[in-house]
Structure formats: C-alpha cells, structure tokens
Image: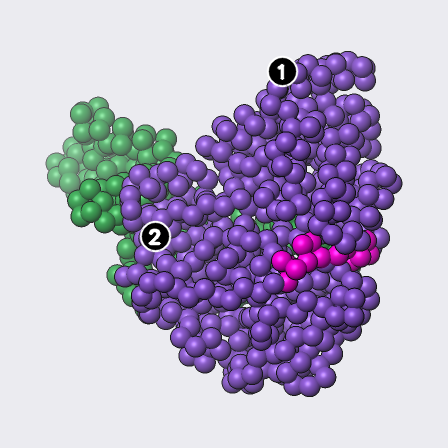
C-alpha cells in the first residue's frame, strides 16, 4: 500500500513540470499585451513610451527564457509574484477567491451526492418502471441544462416571485461574506449557485450510479446472495453499492476538481468572486503571472484529487490495494 | 505622436471665457437627508488605486471619492462642457495671465488628508510633478496631456503657479481630468511613487474602509471633509460586477442603488417596467463616439473613393432611430461632441458624405464610386471588439449598411486583447471598429484622433493638409474662427478623404433607484464621481 502511495506521489512531479512548460509557452502565443490593454483599452490616448515603461516594469521585455526561469523558480519557492493587472501579490489574489471556490465546490458536491446516490440506486433497483423513467428524465435534464442558464433562471425567478409575493424583489447578495462572519448571508448567496451546479453534477453522478449498480446487480455473487435468501436491502447496501461506487467516486473527484476552477460562467452569473472568474479575467487581461499561477494551482488540485481518488480505489477494491 | 501633442499644446481655449467661468455650487432645493450607505455596481475590474497611472473608469468610480482634485467639472452642471469650478483651490478657476501662460491657484486652507496631515500648495506641486514630470521608471498615463507645462511652483504654502511654455486651451480641461487626484507630498517623499498603487490617503469626502480585490471597495464618511455638511452619506460600497445582467439585477433586487456608467435602453425599460417610480432615469449625450477606422495601407482602402463609399453607405439618421432602441448610441454627429459650441449643426452635417437624409442617393453614389475605383464587389473583413454594448450591435449594423452597397463584409469579433493587437500593432485589418472616449470635453484635444500623426489613430495615413488645418485650429483665438476651421477639418477628415467613419455618438442612460438623490448625469462616465453631493431619501 505504501509503495502504491509513493508511486502515485512521484507521478505528480512530471505532470506538474509538463503543465508548467505548456502553460508558460502557450500563454505567450495568445495575441495581446497587458500594458496595451491597461493603457489603451479605454480608448484614451496611450503614450507608447508609457506602454514601453509598463512592459519593462513587468519584466515583459526580458528574454523569454529569463521569464520562464523566473516563473519556475517562483513556483518552486512558492513565490508566485504579483498580478500584472492589479499589482497585488498573486497569493493574496488567489487566497481571497480560494475560500469561496472551495466552499462552492463542497456545497455543490454535497448537493450532488445527496441527490445522485439515492436516485441512482432507486433508478437501478426499479429499472424500467415509471420511477426509473422519472429519475432518468430528471438526470437528462440536468445534463442538458447548462448550470449558468439554470443560475440565470434562479435569479430571475427569485426576483419575479418575491416581487409578486411580497412586493419587493429579492435576489441573492452579490458580494461574498465569509461563513465565519455571517453564516446566514453566506448561505443566502452560495446556496443558489451550489444548487445550480450541483444539479448538473448530480445528473452525471446519478446516471453513473445507476449504470454501475445495474452492472453489479447482474454479477454472479449477487445472484448467489439472493439464492442464499439475503434481504434485498442488505444485498444492495452491503454487497452491490460499495462495489458499484468506483466509477461514481471517479466522477465525483473529477467534478470537484473542475468546480474549483471551472465555474467560469456560473460565477459570473452570480457575481461570485471565485477562481473561475479570476481565471477568465486574467486570460482576457493577458495577465501572464496570474494565469500561470492559476493554471498551476488547478493542475495541482486535479493531480491531488486524482491522488485521493486513487486512494479511494485502493480502499474500495482490495485487488488494487494488494496488486 | 510627440508632434501631435506639441500641436495640441498650442491650442487656445475653446470659448475661453465660458470655459474658465466658475459657477458656484447650487444649493439643494429640498431637505437633504443624511446617513446611509450607497451601494453601487461597477462594470469593470480594478487595476491599481494609483489613478495617475491608470485609464479605466473602473478605478475612478471606487477611488475618486477618497480624493480631491485641484479643479473639477461643476457637479451641479456636469452637462456643460465648459463649466469648471475649484475643488482644492479657492475662488474661481484662474483665467491665466501673461498671455495665458501663467495660472495661479490659491489653495484652500484647513484641508486635511485622511491621516491628519494638513494640505498645502506643496502637495499640489508634488502631485503634478508626479503626473507631468515623473521619474524615469514611474508611469504616468496623462503626462502627455501637459506638454505645455513648463514649471509648477509654490511661492508660498497656499499658492500654486503653473507656468506654461505656450498658451494652451487644453490646459484647464486637462487639470480638471478626474484622474488627477491630489496626493500628500509627505506620502510621496516617505513611501515613494509605488505606495499609492495599494494605499489610499486623500482629502476626499470618504475614507477608505476596505478593498477586497475582485469584490468591492468601501469607504466611510470623512468627518473632516473640507466642505462643511458634506458628505451626506455615512459611507459607500462599490461592488465590482463586470456582467451587465448582474448590475441590472442588482438594481432591481436593490443589492445596489445605481450604476454610473450606463445601461442600454432595453435595460432601462425593463427596470422601469418592473419597478415603476422606484426607478429614476437620467439621460445624456456621451463623450464617446464609435468610429470605423480604415486601414489606408491596405488596398483598395488607400483610394479615397473607396473610403468615401464606405461612409456614404451608412444611413446614420435611420441608424440613430433604430439603434437607439437597443444600444447605447443615439446622436448623429461629426468629429465634435454634439451640442458643443464647436459641433456641426444638422444643416452643416447633412452636407457631409454619409449624413444626407436621402440615403438612396448616398448609396447610389457609393456604388458609383466603388465601380469607378474598380472594386464594385468589394470584400471587407470588419474587425470588432467582443463587447456587446455598443460595439457588436453597431458592428452588425455597419455590416448591413455595407451590404446595401454591394460590399461583402464579414465581421470578425475578437476579445479585447486580440482586438488591440490587430488594431494597434499588427495593422492586419481592413476596417475596424474604433472609438474615441474622453472624460472632460475638450474638442480641440479630442479631434486629434482624426490626425494620421496622432498616437491613437490606427488608420496609417499621412494627410498634411489636414495637419495644416489643425495647426491653424489649435491657435485660432476666437470661437468663430475655431468653428470655421473645425468645419474645414471635419469635412476633410470624415467626408472628402473619409479617413475614418463616424458612426453614432454614445448615449448615456442611468437608471437607478429613486431614493438616490443629488447626483446629476454627466456626459462622461468618468465625471461627477466624488459622491459628496449624493444623499439617500430613505
């Protein structure tokens, strides 16, 4: 088991190095310049000397290999530098958003898990009944409806319904309050995006749970358990469900990592100051330092989540543990 | 570019007397209520808090309330392009002596920075030295606005003298630019020139409470503000919300009371339909114009007949009528901000190519010109910026107009960074959407956009006769002379040579919660953002 963990940990290193090389050089292929955008982007006259000075101050006139070395050394020493757009330390910029993104990811995962596993199980157990059809339709809708659209509908629905009922339109807060400061305000903002994203997330997981469980339910050992006269409830819960969770855990892990940086549009719809919104802004602003740091952090999250998933595999499946 | 700013600096005051005539702040007629916090949304991300080096309104809206200016556009009459009043100076805005080469400002006494340091003339001098004569490695976005300034001195603690190299009508409007906030000399001397990128210490109506990057900036009332009884608010919070739908919903759901940049007409109508008299609307012409820049280095756009055909294709009057229902554009105008004394009247406009009310005749003439130039089936790649309002809306309209004269135009919409790369660096476009957006209305400076030698003109052309007209315009002493020369300049720039096509001027619509009182719309989203005159009727 320890060998398995060590092997998985070592595999993270080449993945991170490859990502660093790719992100650094691909970013510089995107046309545009942060200084041009900052100084000329508003249509006002921009003095070329000022643009040149801006580039010099940001190190953009240095040789590309010098820039790469600065980036790699910074990443290794956990000094991510300053944002080219705001001038703030990147750790500060990301730190502020990380809490929100992490909370959303946990809440959406919670919503997804409490919906998907029971529904997936019910759907599999009641295969080809009206219950199965309803659950499948529900999950197909979840996959088909983009989270951001659902988010827009939620906001508009809240505005319209609250105005109709109370005469005063209400919408979720548009600025983040830490749960440690005001849990009520925090929840009234984040519950809606968690539902919007959690629904899509649950739809994928529901279908995965259903199909995985159906496959397991056709296994010989399940037939044997039934032949022994075990209760169906015990067969499902103790013997089938655990063995069918392997692909479900994979999906949950991938989706969780995706939520940490991929809620690009949903964050904009709800005006959430999260990593996804920061990601988009940094790319649009040609803020190389920030984009590089964000990509590396998301890569690290993915790598780490996969590591955790691998550990879960080993826990769920003794064949992996003892191989 | 240096050349053009030297020319610019030679310009004389537009309607000088009017421009320099100070108007006292009108008293508010009805009972003002004090207290409360104004929440407003800002449709932009924030760069640094050092306004001297930044250009976006996204920093003016949250940070301007912490600071004061030497002079400002009159907040009670912000629609006037010529009404400036003192902010940190006393009395009226100086008119200039020694042949308009010396401007002496008397500085208010008893003004304190938020850290308690008293303001003196030396703070003004240090600030303007940073803006106009910064050290080599210190950025200053508007340094070139002050090419005419020779020295800035403080003969005593409450007098500042700007000595100009030559008289310039651009000087006073340049000083009133809202980015020229006053810093403390002590801060600049003690902490250096980078300190203000992350720290705030001004003399404005509000003190900094919190900056939460990507989320909001908040301020609390400055009890020592130099205007007695102001500000009325206890504080403000500017919430960053780049998406327009969020800003609109925020006002509807009362998460924010106002957005100072402007909404399109449909958004205004939706808000009014949903909330009725709980929404107040102010509208104004906007000192921004959308242009079509034509790349003269690409054939056949080096041919004036082709460029003229492209401007003739535009039915501006119908465009105004219909686009103003869906986009933040409305006013048909020439090179000067509409309604300014130097702007063309309708009778003057209709004489220009593409401004005739007989669009059929214009389109027929356009097709004839294209045929004569040997390109009856012209193909155009139209570069546009990936921003809905008003770029993509007007771009789509422009494509349709071109098609009506047989031009096969394809719109290529790019994100802002890629768009600027094409427009400013690669010059690989045929025709591109472009814009001229300014804060303080200053036509003689603003129209330099149409000169080939201007740093923000991307058409890649040289037109010496146009430069010559501008040189005369810049030194014309009277408004009458300036008007005549401006018409000559306008006719050559956008009609005879059709270097650029003026589409429509922007139209500013501010729909906001009716309990917000005291704020008056300005013809620019950069102006009237001190917030000291706003109160909440709640």
- Residue at x 67%, y 19% (from the top left corner): B362
First of labels 1, 2 by sequence position = 1
Check if residue B195 falls in the magenta segment.
Answer: no
Q: Is mark 1 on a helix, strand or loop?
A: helix
The quarter of the picture where the C terminus of chain B appears is: bottom left
Question: Is residue B285 shown left or right of residue B271?
Answer: right
Instruction: Answer with left or right where residue A99 lies relative to residue B119.
Output: left
Q: Is residue B289 left or right of residue B366?
A: left
Q: In the rendered image, which quarter is residue A102 located in?
A: bottom left
Horizontal relation, residue B377 to residue B276: left or right: right
Q: Residue at x 85, y 44 (%)?
A: B468
The chain ID associated with circle 2 is B
Q: Residues within 10 Å of mark 1 (few under 14, many from 20)?
A: some
Image location (x, y in percent) of residue B230: 42, 72
Q: Is mark 2 on a helix, strand or loop?
A: strand
Res. A89 mark:
none
Hue used for the chain lettered B: purple
Mark 2 residue crowding within 10 angstroms, few (<14) / some (14–19) / many (20+):
many
Q: Where is residue A122 in the image (x, y as percent from the top left)?
A: 20, 35
Query: Which shade is chain A?
Result: green
* Residue assigned mark 1: B360
Main SS of the magenta part reads helix
The chain under label 1 reads B
Q: Nearer the viewer, residue A220 or B138?
A: B138
Residue highlighted by disc 2: B513
Query: Residue at 40% across / 75% down in the picture?
Result: B229
Q: Pick the residue in front: A79 or B401.
A: B401
């Amino acid at each position: 088991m320890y060998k398995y963990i060590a092997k998985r940990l070592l595999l993270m290193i080449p993945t991170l190095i490859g990502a660093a090389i790719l992100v650094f050089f691909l970013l510089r292929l995107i046309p545009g310049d942060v200084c041009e955008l900052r100084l000329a982007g508003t249509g006002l006259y921009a003095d070329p000397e000022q643009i040149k000075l801006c580039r010099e101050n940001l190190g953009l006139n240095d040789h590309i290999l010098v820039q790469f070395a600065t980036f790699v050394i910074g990443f290794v020493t956990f000094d991510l530098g300053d944002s080219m757009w705001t001038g703030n330390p990147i750790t500060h910029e990301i730190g502020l958003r990380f809490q929100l993104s992490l909370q959303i990811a946990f809440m959406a995962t919670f919503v997804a898990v409490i919906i998907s596993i029971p529904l997936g199980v019910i759907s599999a157990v009641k295969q080809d009944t009206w219950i199965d059809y309803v659950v499948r339709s529900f999950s197909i809708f979840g996959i088909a409806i983009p989270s951001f659209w659902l988010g827009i509908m939620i906001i508009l629905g809240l505005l319209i319904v609250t105005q109709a009922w109370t005469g005063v339109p209400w919408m979720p807060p548009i600025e983040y309050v830490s749960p440690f400061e005001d849990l009520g305000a925090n929840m009234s903002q984040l519950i809606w995006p968690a539902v919007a994203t959690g629904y899509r997330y649950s739809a994928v997981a529901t279908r995965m749970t259903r199909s995985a469980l159906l496959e397991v339910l056709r296994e010989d050992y399940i037939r044997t358990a039934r032949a022994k006269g075990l209760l169906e409830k015990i067969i499902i819960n103790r013997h089938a469900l655990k063995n069918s969770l392997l692909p479900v855990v994979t999906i949950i892990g991938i989706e969780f990592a995706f939520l940490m940086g991929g809620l690009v549009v949903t964050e904009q719809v709800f005006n959430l100051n999260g990593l996804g919104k920061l990601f988009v802004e940094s790319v649009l602003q040609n803020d190389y330092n920030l984009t590089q740091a964000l990509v590396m952090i998301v890569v690290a999250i993915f790598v780490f989540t996969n590591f955790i998933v691998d550990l879960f595999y080993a826990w769920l499946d003794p064949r992996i543990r003892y191989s | 570019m240096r050349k053009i700013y030297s020319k610019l600096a030679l310009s004389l005051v537009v309607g000088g007397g009017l421009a320099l005539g100070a108007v006292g702040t009108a008293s508010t007629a009805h009972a003002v209520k004090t207290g409360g916090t104004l929440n407003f949304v800002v449709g932009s991300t924030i760069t640094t808090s050092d306004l001297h080096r930044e250009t976006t309104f996204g920093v003016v809206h949250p940070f301007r309330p912490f600071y004061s200016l030497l002079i400002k556009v009159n907040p009670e009459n912000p629609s006037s392009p010529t009404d400036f009043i003192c902010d940190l100076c006393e009395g009226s805005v100086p008119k200039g002596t020694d042949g308009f080469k010396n401007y002496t400002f008397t500085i208010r006494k008893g003004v304190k920075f938020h850290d308690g340091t008293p303001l003196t003339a030396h703070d003004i001098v240090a600030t303007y030295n940073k803006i106009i004569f910064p050290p080599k490695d210190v950025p200053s976005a508007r340094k070139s606005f002050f090419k005419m300034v020779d020295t800035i001195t403080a003969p005593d603690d409450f007098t500042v003298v700007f000595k100009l190299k030559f008289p310039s009508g651009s000087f006073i409007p340049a000083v009133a630019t809202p980015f020229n906030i006053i810093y403390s000399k002590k801060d600049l001397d003690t902490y250096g020139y980078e300190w203000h990128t992350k720290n705030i210490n001004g003399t404005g109506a509000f003190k900094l409470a919190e900056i939460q990057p990507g989320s909001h900036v908040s301020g609390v009332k400055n009890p020592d503000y130099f205007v007695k009884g102001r500000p009325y608010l206890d504080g403000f919070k500017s919430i960053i919300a780049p998406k327009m739908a969020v800003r609109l919903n925020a006002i509807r759901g009362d998460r924010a009371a106002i957005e100072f940049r402007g909404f399109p007409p449909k958004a205004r109508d939706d808000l009014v339909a949903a909330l009725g008299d709980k929404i107040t609307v102010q509208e104004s012409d906007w000192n921004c114009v959308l242009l079509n820049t034509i790349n003269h280095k690409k054939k056949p756009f080096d041919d004036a007949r082709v460029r003229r055909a492209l401007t003739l294709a535009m039915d501006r009057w119908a465009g105004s009528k219909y686009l103003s229902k869906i986009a933040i554009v409305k006013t048909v105008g020439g090179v000067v901000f509409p309604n300014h004394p130097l702007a063309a009247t309708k009778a003057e406009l209709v004489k220009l190519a593409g401004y005739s009310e007989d669009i059929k005749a214009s389109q027929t003439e356009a097709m004839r010109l294209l045929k004569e130039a040997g390109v009856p089936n012209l193909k155009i790649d139209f570069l546009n910026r990936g921003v809905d309002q008003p770029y993509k809306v007007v771009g789509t309209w422009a494509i349709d107009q071109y098609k009506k004269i047989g031009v096969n135009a394809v719109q290529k919409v790019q994100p802002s960074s890629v768009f600027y790369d094409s427009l400013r660096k690669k010059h690989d476009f045929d025709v591109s959407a472009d814009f001229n957006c300014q804060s303080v209305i200053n036509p003689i400076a603003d129209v330099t956009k149409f000169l080939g030698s201007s740093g923000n003109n991307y058409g890649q052309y040289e037109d010496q006769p146009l430069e010559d007209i501008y040189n005369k315009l810049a030194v014309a002493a009277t408004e009458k002379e300036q008007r005549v020369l401006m018409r000559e300049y306008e006719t050559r720039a956008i009609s005879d040579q059709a270097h650029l096509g003026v589409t429509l001027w922007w139209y500013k619509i501010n729909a906001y919660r009716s309990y917000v009182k005291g704020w008056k719309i300005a013809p620019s989203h950069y102006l009237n953002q001190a917030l000291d005159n706003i109160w909440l009727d709640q």
